[in-house]
Amino acid sequence: MFHAQILTLFPEFFDTPLSCSIPKRAIAAGIVDVDCIQLRDFATDKHSKVDDAPYGGGPGMLMKPGPVVAAIREARKRQPDTHVVMLTPSGISFTQAKALEYTEKSGITLLCGRYEGFDERICDYVDEEISLGDYVLSGGEPAALCVLDSVIRLLPDVLGSPESAVLDSFTEEGILDWPHYTRPEEFEGKHVPDVLLSGNHAKIEKWRHEQAILRSRKADLDGVKHDG
């Protein structure tokens, strides 16, 4: 079984997403278990405070090292082999390859931040720092959910067809998936490409590969334009 732990101030954030679709089936089948650990449980003051003002001044509040590190230690106590991942904008980019790498571990612990982020000293207590991209979220919970969902669907026996995960975007050669079509053959004047109706599997595979490369190149070019 794959063990996932989430260190968060808002465990309820995960209730509905994990009770739907693929995560729900994986949990029900005993393929994965997910345990949310409330960070406030490790605060030592009567108000269960987990944040404080930054030294040197500036806006916002920072997650204090004491409660967070105590929560990390509790997660490691529960799952000694867990891989602790901090969700932070300064981390390395999360990729499909990284998701696949996580499936080879016995489990992961996802640390969700809030406010203006973490006290820098907390970084010494995690195994890895991950970012979903160059944008700001209200907290690490949405990022943790994305990571968890992408990992769960790659675990053995989770998807109905093992081929589905193999053919996902970014899985093969790091490129996007090809365009897909289903019935009807014609919709508002737009037709399914003839090659997909030909029954010639060699031609279909060649077309799909070419389209995947074209789509990936276009996405790369659009990304450059958007950044500029």
Image (spheres, grey):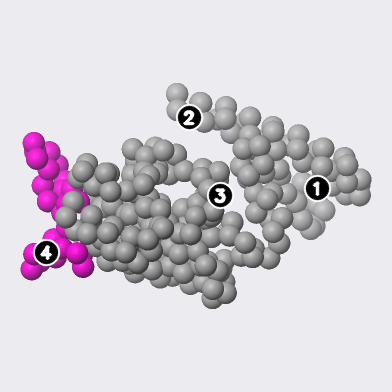
Which secondary structure lies at badge 2? helix
* Residue annotated with mark 3: 100
Which secondary structure lies at badge 4? loop
Classify mark 2: residues with Cα within 10 Å, few (<14), some (14-19) or many (20+).
Answer: few
Q: Quadrant of the C terminus?
A: top left
Which quadrant holds residue 172? top right
Classify mark 4: residues with Cα within 10 Å, few (<14), some (14-19) or many (20+).
Answer: few
Alpha carbon distance from label 2 to label 3: 29 Å
Classify mark 3: residues with Cα within 10 Å, few (<14), some (14-19) or many (20+).
Answer: some
Report the residue at 82% width, 37% height from top: 206
- N-terminal of the two: label 3 or label 1? 3
* Residue annotated with mark 2: 226
* Residue annotated with mark 4: 44
- N-terminal of the two: label 2 or label 3? 3
* Residue annotated with mark 1: 192
Which secondary structure lies at badge 3? helix
